Amino acid sequence: MTTQWPLVSLNDLSLAIDYGHTASASNDPSGPKFLRITDLRDEGVDWAQVPFCSCSASAELETQLQPGDIVFARTGATTGKSHLIKECPNRAIFASYLIRVRLSNEADPNYVAHFFRTPDYWSQISQSSTGTAQPGVNSTNLRRLRIPIPRLDEQRRIAAILDQADALRAKRQRSSMLLKKALHAIFDNLFGDLVKNANHWPHGNLVELCSDPTDIRCGPFGTQLGREEFVSTGVPLWGIKHVNSQFASLTTEFVTKRKADALKQYTLLEGDLVMTRKGTIGNCAIYPQGLPVGIMHSDLLRIRMDSRRVNPRFLCHQLQYSRNVAGQISLISGGAVMAGINVTKLKNLVVCLPPLELQHQFDAIFEKQQCLAVSQKASLQYLNRLQASLQHRAFHGEL
């Protein structure tokens, strides 16, 4: 049964909606903690990392934070994003690029904070945009926000349910992070610190691990493949975002079979190691089983390895996470107007080569980890859908 709750403006629910203090951060602990946009994290504020600020007693009083306050990012990539202050030091103020909302006793901060994560909130913010391409947030458009407000006890009941859903999602996200950390730990346990190389594993150049020097190749130049040649179906084209997602996100760009034949030297086959050469320089992924033969964009590199010389999974992990490799990539990608990896220099990149048997052992462990990761991802997607459904029902009087 749907209950129609009154829509109340945030202005009528608030004791104060105001801007923060304009000042620079300081390491001087005699001042209050100085909360900035960069200190706001999904998992909360790490107050130990928040700097201090020098300000007058009156400025500190005006911008003093307390538990239950909700702060909004006014600018930057997180414009409009809100954060509920659940705990803070006795002396803590907020910076000018934040807006602080302090609610009256008629509204439960936790309930209202959940509303600020709904599509309805973002829709209202977008409609009251300050004329820029990115939705803007100021005290005026915040005051005009209209929020469905039931009785206070009902607000608290709804907030408790949404808190439980959030807690489940957070646990699943932490599990996924721990699974990744476990894989890194297993890699280190099998091979040791490859920078120190206490086991004295041999080294080799990347090109020596390929059957042919041309197996390390950059994607086609713009003159070889223009956007006007893209079609809606055919041979898939892959770019940076696909490597960054480990090919979990599918492409919407294709070329004809005839064009793909003309670009066959830029193909991606199952087991190829693919690296980004611009943007997120040095990110790596293995072109997975089940995908058809593809073509890479110009901002990617393909490394087609000889599996008799190196295990692709082992090499991918080393290229992605080794501090030694990261340093080499930094050197070979710098010095240009737009940073990018020089293919000739990449061929001479030095990697560590433990026994192939150990590399295969890591590959087998990786496969098992991937099965767990797929299961956890499906679980997280389910919890995301559940949270979205609960959120919708909660603010439409259906929960």
Image (tube, rainbow, N blue to C red):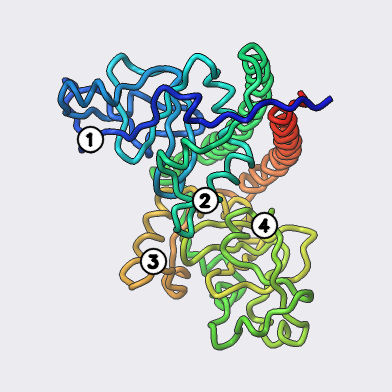
Q: Is residue 13 visible?
A: yes
* Mark 3 or mark 1: whose residue is earlier in sequence: 1
User: In the picture, residue 380 is in which quadrant?
Assistant: top right
For disc 1, the marked residue is 25
Q: Indicate left or right for 103 with 263 as reference.
A: left
Q: CA distance from mark 1 to mark 2?
A: 38 Å
| SS class, disc 2 | helix
| SS class, disc 4 | loop
Q: CA distance from mark 2 to mark 3?
A: 18 Å
Quarter that holds the C terminus = top right
* Mark 2 or mark 4: whose residue is earlier in sequence: 4
Q: CA distance from mark 3 to mark 4?
A: 24 Å
| Residue type, label 2 | Gln
* Mark 1 or mark 2: whose residue is earlier in sequence: 1
Tell me the residue at 45%/58% (across/down). Answer: 131
| SS class, disc 1 | strand
For disc 2, the marked residue is 318
Judge whether 219 appears above or below 165 on screen. below
Number of other residues with Cα within 10 Å of mark 2, as a class: few under 14, some 14 to 19, many 20 or more = many
Number of other residues with Cα within 10 Å of mark 3, as a class: few under 14, some 14 to 19, many 20 or more = many
Q: Estimate the x, y position of residue 327 in percent, counting from the top left.
A: 37, 55
For disc 4, the marked residue is 247
For disc 3, the marked residue is 333
Q: Estimate the x, y position of residue 325 in percent, counting from the top left.
A: 43, 55
Tell me the residue at 51%/52% (across/down). Answer: 320
Q: Estimate the x, y position of residue 143 in percent, counting from the top left.
A: 47, 35
